[in-house]
Image (cartoon, rainbow, N blue to C red):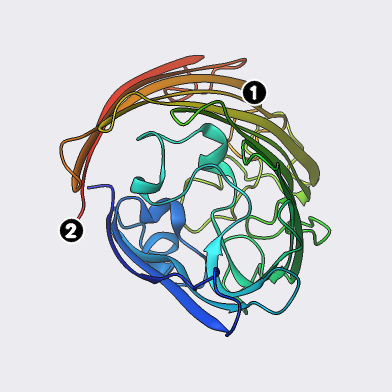
Amino acid sequence: MHQADIRITRLPDTYQTDHVDFGYRFDLIYGMDYRFTTMKGFWSDQLLEKNKKYGFDMPMAYVDTYIPGIAQGMNIRVGRFISLPDIEAQLAPDNYLFSHSLLYAYDPYTQVGVVDTVKLNNNWSVQLGLTAGNDTFPGTSGSKLSPLLCVQWISGSNADSIYGCANTINGANYAYNNINQWVATWSHRFSQTLNNQLEVWYMKENNVPVCSGQVGSDGPSTPFGCLNSSTLDPLRRYNTSEVAVVDYLNWQVSSKDSVSFRVEYMDDRQGQRTGTPARYWGEAIGWTHFFNQSVLIRPEINRYQASSPAFNGGLSRTQTMVAADLIVRF
């Protein structure tokens, strides 16, 4: 089982203008996917010390306060939330496909802190925030006070949106998953049934050590994101960077069926994220079918290729997967 999710949520009323309103969201998950969402210092001994196959996590736990009297509305979010911005999300029902892009598998998942979102007018919004860094709970080793700044523009027709963020800007010195990131997402709606989302990433981390043969992003009890290469000097530290592009084209075929096509590229130049220095290309196509409002199935096929042998234990440059997931809502 990948994940079972119990969600408790209330959206603040952002349409009214006469009173302060509150909202919240709490998600408790159990399953194999906790291995991806684990935050150091928050139930992290399940993975980092015991390496359990299944575990618990709470990837979202925050409170919203909406204040209508500032500009065209201001929302203050405090707690643990998904790192900004992203097309994909940790919880299965929030994604277009069963699988994730390679970028999403290795970029930061969640942060703890505060984000202030101000709607300036019908076209522009800004976000300012302060967090403890990527996937680290405040007060734990590796946590770093990290500002973030986002700007979003929405066209008058609501057909286009450009959303850019500078996230975790703290000097990028090596710590637990302490990559600094600059991200931009462009969303375009062709029609009521066809839309496209394009995301571009640049990430970096400085003074990264060599892992002495261990891949830090996979094994428990090792630093997250150290370098794994026999050609590197184990006494030196290295500056690392990655660039990535992900595009989703989504077609609503009928009231019960949709098709999504994903293409992606990632250049993990020093292998700091994947463990293998390589350029990666990937394509995926998937179909979502709702049997009813509570049950859906998502079969898909995806294929990856790399400029260096990065799959099957370093023996292959390509990987193909045919898979499906079944989601039951209750």
Name which quarter of the figure residue 273 lies in: top right
Q: How many marks?
A: 2
Above or below, 321 against 7 in this view is above
Residue 250 in sight: yes
Residue 295 falls left or right of residue 244: left
Q: Looking at the image, which residue is at 54% across and 47% down? A: 217
- Residue 136 — which label? none
Compare residues 286 and 272 and report the one nearer the observer.
286
Compare residues 80 and 46 and report the one nearer the observer.
80
Q: Looking at the image, which residue is at 22% across and 47% down? A: 1
Inspect the image, locate mark 1, and give the three-letter code of the amino acid beneath it: Ala
Residue 308 falls left or right of residue 291: right
Compare residues 118 and 5 and report the one nearer the observer.
118
Mark 2 lies on residue:
330
Residue 284 falls left or right of residue 275: left
Name which quarter of the figure residue 8 lies in: bottom left
Compare residues 244 and 251 and report the one nearer the observer.
251
Above or below, 54 against 229 in this view is below
Q: Position of residue 152 (x, y in %)?
A: 72, 50
Name which quarter of the figure residue 268 lies in: top right
Q: Position of residue 131 (x, y in %)?
A: 67, 70
Decide: few, some or many residues near mark 2? Use Cα within 10 Å; few <14, some 14-19, many ≥20.
Answer: few
Mark 1 lies on residue:
278
Q: Looking at the image, which residue is at 59% across and 30% down? A: 246
